[in-house]
Amino acid sequence: QLQLQESGPGLVTPSETLSLTCTVSGGSISSSPYYWAWIRQTPGKGLDWIANIYYSGTTNYNPSLKSRVTISLDTSKNQFSLKLNSVTAADTAVYSCARGGSHVHYAIDHWGRGTLVTVSS
Amino acid sequence: DIQMTQSPTSLSASVGDRVTITCRASQIINRYLNWYQHKPGKAPKLLIYAASSLQSGVPSRFSGSGSGTDFSLTIESLQPEDFATYYCQQSSGDSHTFGQGTNLEIK
């Protein structure tokens, strides 16, 4: 059974870089037809799509975050990562990693449990 | 960027009721529309993909319809476990934006 687990600091200083890793078990991140994504939920608000990366390495970014975000794959560790630079308090959120793909018309069928990241000095 | 607008943003209903949530896209997305159920402290759950395809394991009281820009999610005969927040999401563009959510509460 596919499982995704987020890891990374729970507290980030303003203007610094938020770095998170998603470890995937029960499946390979190199497999077609999947993509791997990061989504966040800010306190009291809805879901915000951040970025995704396909098994092939093709990436897509939320235009409002694109200048600050990098998503990448590490196939040797079966992990993928998120870097968000120049963070502010507005980036405080629960960050979730997820899997989607063409098998479900590019929807998301597996999610991690999410990790709270607070931006504060 | 494609914007998704859900309505209503909150809804009160009783067990056994039939409810419908709508979602409108800012441009044509064909049938690239998905619905999720989200409960506090849990991961969102995919209910419907491709506008009307029921995800494996999801009860048949959930159904979706629509194409182009206008879509709906219907829940027949609400069960206690259905009270949650529901999100639509488009997977047509490069960035797969979500609607703002509909909070379904017990009346």
Image: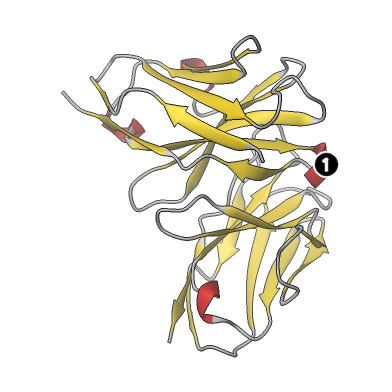
Which amino acid, by three-letter code, is at mark 1? His
Return the x and y of residue B33 as percentages of the image width and height.
74, 53
Q: Residues within 10 Å of mark 1 (few under 14, many from 20)?
A: few
Q: Chain of mark 1?
A: A
Q: Report x, y in % for residue B64.
A: 76, 67
Above or below — where is A107 with respect to A67?
below
Residue shown at 59% from the left, 37% from the top? A3
Q: Is residue A106 above or below residue B105?
A: above
Asked whether B72 or A101 is in front, the reply is A101
Q: Is residue A88 left or right of residue B92?
A: left
Question: Please, which colouring scheme is shown?
Answer: secondary structure
The residue beneath circle 1 is A103
Residue A87 rendering spot, x and y as whole percentages: 33, 22
Of the 4 image quadrants, the one containing the N terminus of chain B is: top right
**Which residue is at the front of the view, A95 or A25?**
A25
Mark 1 secondary-structure assignment: helix
Total tally of numbered discs in the picture: 1
Please give left or right for residue B91 compared with residue A47 in the image: right
Expressed as whole percent of the image width and height from the top left, the position of residue B58 reads 71, 65
Rendered image quadrant of residue A107: top right
Q: Residue sitting at 74 percent across and 62 percent down?
A: B70
Residue that protrudes farthest toward the top in the picture? A76
Quarter of the C terminus of chain B within the rendering: bottom left
Residue drawn at (60%, 89%) of the image: B17
